[in-house]
Image (cartoon, grey):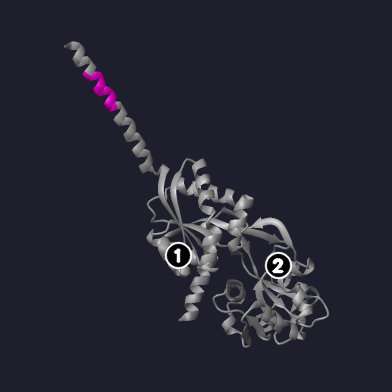
Amino acid sequence: MKKTWLVLLLAMLMTLTACGGNKKEATADADGNVIEDLKIQFVPSREPDEIVTKTEPLKEILKTKLAEKGYDVKNIDITVGTNYESTGEALSAGSVDVGFIPGGTYAIYDDGAEVLLTATRKGLSIESDDPKEWNDKKPTDKAEEQVDFYRALIIAGPTEKGKELAAKVNNGEELTWEDLSSAKWSVMGSSSSAGYIYPYLWLQKNYEKGLTDLPSVVQADSYPSSMARLASGQVDIMVGFADVRMDNAEKWQNEFGKTASIWDETNVIGVTDKIYNDTISVSKNSEIMTDEFKKALQDSFIEIGESEEGKDIIAIYSHEGYKAAEDKNYDGEREAQKLLKELKN
């Protein structure tokens, strides 16, 4: 009888031990080591079908990278938002876990989104906020170093007024508001970071004025058309991203009819603050987004950006890699969004 009770007791202990092991495994799942669904959304900066097709291989690569860091992701769902705002709203609501969004979109939705990574691209041979340095060291070339930002330039052309402004800058003299307001300007649409917003902020910072205070401003429909106006003398100044002259160097002579090179006939007279690249942001309201999982995602995307297969995927957005982001880097975008609201009112 005693032996029977002893056997029953041992059996009960073994059952309890087994149950305890199962409970521990279930707790591990609840702690986030097993992710049933990871939802990623891209903004529609390209054709949605093209984005979905190009990023399909990302699913397995990301699963593999996260597995190396202790996370078993069962399914990755990749979608494309109907517009930039819809992706920002989905991040805020927690219906999307990870979003590939521009800095401006992040700045609008940062109540519900957290920036994780900033995209990197090849930098330029000149990196300075001093316009004279851009002129002393021209022409500008691509550099091998990866950077997470770009700048906008205020560029003077070959008109008499353009040469006058460039001469002052190259002599180390400060331009006055009267100098700038006496020139004819070409800008892009008011939602363009490099073609409008950051040059506007540059004027505010240095002169407490804006593009809307200039007497003579025309809006171009593209950077080449803005450059064509500069070449023809229709305008004295144009604004654009820092490598806009590199992109239009051949057109300057072949299409715009100039005999001298773009580097001989243009000069930088102003340099804006840094404009930080696109982000990979995560939802603050996603149930799976723990600090540990965010770190695993961050490291995984950096590693993906360093691989040849990964580079081929992220090239859909002209990204060449990723680095850890800092929220404060997007303060300029917050100022930009504030400016846009003021311009609309």
What residue type is disc 1 on? Thr
Q: Which residue, given by chain and number where applicable, does mark 2 sit on?
A: 130
Disc with the residue nearer the chain's start (1 vs 2): 1
The vertical placement of 196 against 145, above or below, is below
Vertical order, 90 against 288 (above or below): below
Q: Residue furthest left?
A: 1
- Residue drawn at x 63%, y 82% as measured from the top left: 220
- Is residue 91 found left or right of 14 in the rendered image? right
Residue 10 part of the magenta segment:
yes
Disc sitting over residue 87 in the figure: 1
Q: Which residues are magenta?
A: 8-16
Q: Determine whether the residue tagged by mark 1 lies in a helix, strand or loop.
A: helix
Q: Residues within 10 Å of mark 1 (few under 14, many from 20)?
A: many
Q: Please name whichever residue, 244 or 308, is drawn nearer the observer in this view of the structure.
A: 308
Could you tell me residue 191's position as x and y percent? 54, 75
Residue 180 percent across, percent down from the top left: 67, 82
Name the one closer to the observer, 121 or 314. Answer: 314
- Which one is nearer the viewer's eye here, 303 or 241? 303
Q: Residue furthest right?
A: 259
Q: Residue at x 34, y 34 (%)?
A: 24
Helix, strand or loop for disc 2 = loop
Q: Does 157 appear above or below 172? A: below
**Callout 2, which amino acid?**
Asp
